[in-house]
Structure formats: structure tokens, C-alpha cells
Image (spheres, coloured by chain):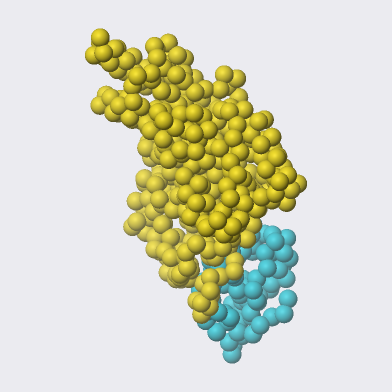
Amino acid sequence: MEYVIFIARSVTQAQRMMRTLEACGIWAKIFRAPVGLTEFGCSYAVKIRREKLWQAMDCLRRGGLAPLSVHEKTESGYREVRV
Amino acid sequence: MIYLDSGATTLEKPPAVARAMARAVGEMSSPGRGNYPASQKAARTAYDCREAAAALFHVPSPEQVIFTSNATHGLNIAIRTLVRPGGRVAVSGYEHNAVTRVLHSIPGVEIVVVDAPLYRPEQMLEGFRTALRRGVDAVICNHVSNVFGCVQPVGELAGLCRRARTPLIVDASQSAGILPVSLTDWGAAFVAMPGHKGLYGPQGTGLLLCGAEARPLLFGGTGSASRRQTMPADLPDRLEAGTHNMPGIAGLLEGLRFVSHAGMERIAQWERRLTRRAEEGLARLPGVEIFADKTGQNQTGVLSFRVKGLDCEQVGEELARRQIAVRAGLHCAPLAHRTAGTLETGTIRISPSVFNTEGQIDLFLREMSGILRENTEKSV
């Protein structure tokens, strides 16, 4: 499955993102963010399906949530997505 | 035992509280520490608790709900954020040591005490109006006095503070779970509350609702931004260093659900009904002085009284011997006693919970009558 991840500021923000997305009908899963993607180490990320990215961004914006960064999973690793 | 000391700690909890705590001990580790189920379950429970508190107390976002170990902990964060050495602070004349001792620990702070007679909110408000006109760095006021149950005009005070652009700290220790508490409506900088009183959670829990940027009191691991040697900038991690009290948080969540389900107004009405019954009964006993709002408008289910010729601690002890638990003395609030003129004697306080009954109040009154009779016989 192709997916993108939103890097959260805290596990609490990740929880809020996940529930906001679920309320918008978007499947989301929380996991520890890969260390290489975090500026200061130890963070949480929310994973969604690639094709839901723009719907999810809209949903998060309406919920007053801004991820620290967004990354797309590719065959060679993660690639940052400008949103 | 008849337990009438819920102003200190509600002893009887909804059964779901203990069940949730036991589950947490066996099934939860710490939120924000791993991808494994025990950590994820802890994270979900902590978030559920923040969300439940945010809904109950009108907090814009669950991140602004901070877990503390009690109201004192939250008040320390709030006060140390807003009050600097040499600052000037206005407080009500009914504050607890959880406020006054913190202020006294900051060098050179000028404390403006706003005095007003018991159950006179309009006079209290006038005093704060004057203090704000003269200029203060912050205002601190409890929503309800832990000694006398008098309700302070926090809604109106919040309006004055907003207009004066002065941050307000509310100590909601005696009101959370009983009266409407709204971070949004008040526009308060901070609202602190314990989990173990009117929210029916376990001891060792509390909440700090943040409407302003806060300075950490504790520094340490948060499971986030670990490479940084400063605390994270974002709430709640900024104020929550170290491992969370997950059994406590799981229990508090059930307490919050109980309060939401039962309804704060219904709980408050029942407790007030019980203290009115006690008040009417005590008024018939010789030598008993009761501190009560005759209008019934400005008092919660907390009632203080004292007995002529009897030390309040002696009355508390006699009641304890008869399996009735009350609080006697100064209730960690000497300022409130000074304001009310009871500093030299202290008072006896009863504070029922939603689980007490009218029959228990009648038994308390019967035992009080017995104590007074015995002491009269001894003295003749």
C-alpha cells in the first residue's frame, strides 16, 4: 500500500490527528516516527493512504491541526511532500 | 463509617474507577514511549481523559489539558509562570496555602489580599476592581472556598481581568465537578483542579487547564524531541516530564465520565440539600455557630461550624470515635480563617459527596447532639 505520514509534535497531537481524520472517514494509524524524519528525535507520526492526502490535509486544517512535516513512502525510503 | 470529608478527598468512588485503575496496572505502560500495544493503550487512555476534561471544562483543545499530581502542582506551575520576584499579585481573602505558600516562596512578591465578608461576592468583586485599577501582574482566586463553601464571583472577575489585560488563575479545587468551569468563557490564563475531590478520581491526579503559555516546573523526558536539551515548546509535553501516572489517569477518566453522566448540577443540588439539612439540625443545638449563606445562592455543599466552649479538633476526634469523618482545624487555609474571623478557633467542616444520604446526615446530627450533651454533663 502506498502511504504518507504526518509528523506530529507529540503523541497527544498524533492522537488528535488520528481521531480528527477518522471523523472525516479517513483510516489512520499512529506509530513512532522514523528517527531520520524528526528534527530533534523521538516523535510520533500518523499514517494514511496516499490517495487520501489532500482530503486529509483539508480535514486537519479544518480541525486546526498542522503537522510538522509530511512524507511519502517510496521504494527508496521517505520523500518529503510540500503541502 | 459516615464519611463527610469529601472537600479533602471523595472516599467513595464510582466502581468503574477502581476497575479502570486495576486494568491500567496490568495492561498499560506509558504514553508516547513505544509502538507496542501497552504504550498505545496508555496513549489512547491519556488522550481520552484529556478529551473528556476538555469537553467538560470548555478547553479549546485536548493538548491544553495537563496532567498534574494534584491542584497544588498545577497552581505551582501557573503561579511560577506568571509571578516573578518583586511582582504584585491580587488574591482573594479565602485562598488556600496551595496559593499563598507558593507566593511566599517567590522573593519580594507583594500580595494584595482582597477581603470581603463571607458570602458577599459583590464586595469581593469591588475589592478586585480596586486592586486591578492600581495594577497587578496577576489575579488568583478560588472558585469556592474550601473552608466555607462560599462561591466567588469568578465569571465577573474574569471579565474584569480581561478588560484590564491581567492574567487570571482560578483554583477550581472545590468547584470542579460541581459548578460550571469554563476556560473559554473565563478567558483565564490557568485553571487548576484536583482529580480526587469532585471529579471522583484517585489521589495523585489533577488537571491544569492552560489558556496561556506556561513555564515548566519539572524538566526531563517526554518521549518527544529527545535530542533537545530544553523542554518541548508544545503542550502537553512542555509541562509533563517523566512517566505518567497511568492508573491514576485511567481512574480519573472514569471519574470524569461519572460526573458527565450524573450531571454537575444534580450532584451540586444533592450535596447542597444534605448540608442544608445539617445546617437546620445544627441550628437547633445549643452553642453551635454555623457559617452559612442565608440566601442559599452563594454556597456549595461545604459547611463549617464551631461549638462554644469546645475545641474544634476535640469535636472532630469525638466524631471520629463515633465513626463519622469530618475535617477540623484550619483546613490549610489560614488566610480564609483570618478573613472570616475564625483563625483562633478554626472550624469543623462537613463536605458530603453524591454518595452520602439524608439518613447519614441525621445520624451525624444525633451524634453531635450526644457530644454536646456529654460535654455539658461533664462541665456541671
Quarter assignment of residue B14: top left
Q: Nearer the viewer, residue B340 or B203?
A: B340
**Residue placed at 66% from the left, 40% from the top?**
B128
Taking B324 as reference, is B107 above or below it?
A: below
Output the letter for the chain in yellow. Answer: B
Q: Position of residue B140 (x, y in %)?
A: 59, 46
Q: Is residue B196 left or right of residue B339?
A: left
Q: Nearer the viewer, residue B173 or B223?
A: B173
Q: Position of residue B126 (x, y in %)?
A: 69, 34
**Residue placed at 54% from the left, 65% from the top?**
B238
Quarter in which the N terminus of chain B is drawn = top left
Q: Residue furthest bottom?
A: A76
**Residue placed at 28% from the left, 24% from the top?**
B318
> Is residue B289 visible in this depiction of the protein?
yes
Q: Position of residue B84 (x, y in %)?
A: 58, 59
Quarter in which the C terminus of chain B is drawn = top left
Quarter assignment of residue B65: bottom right
Q: Nearer the viewer, residue B88 or B238?
A: B88
Q: How many marks?
A: 0
Q: Is residue B73 left or right of residue A4?
A: left
Taking B210 as reference, is B197 above or below it?
A: above
**Residue placed at 40% from the left, 28% from the top?**
B345
Taking A25 as reference, is B204 above or below it?
A: above
Q: Position of residue B8 (x, y in %)?
A: 41, 38
> Is residue B179 visible in this depiction of the protein?
no
Look at the image and give the colour of chain A.
cyan
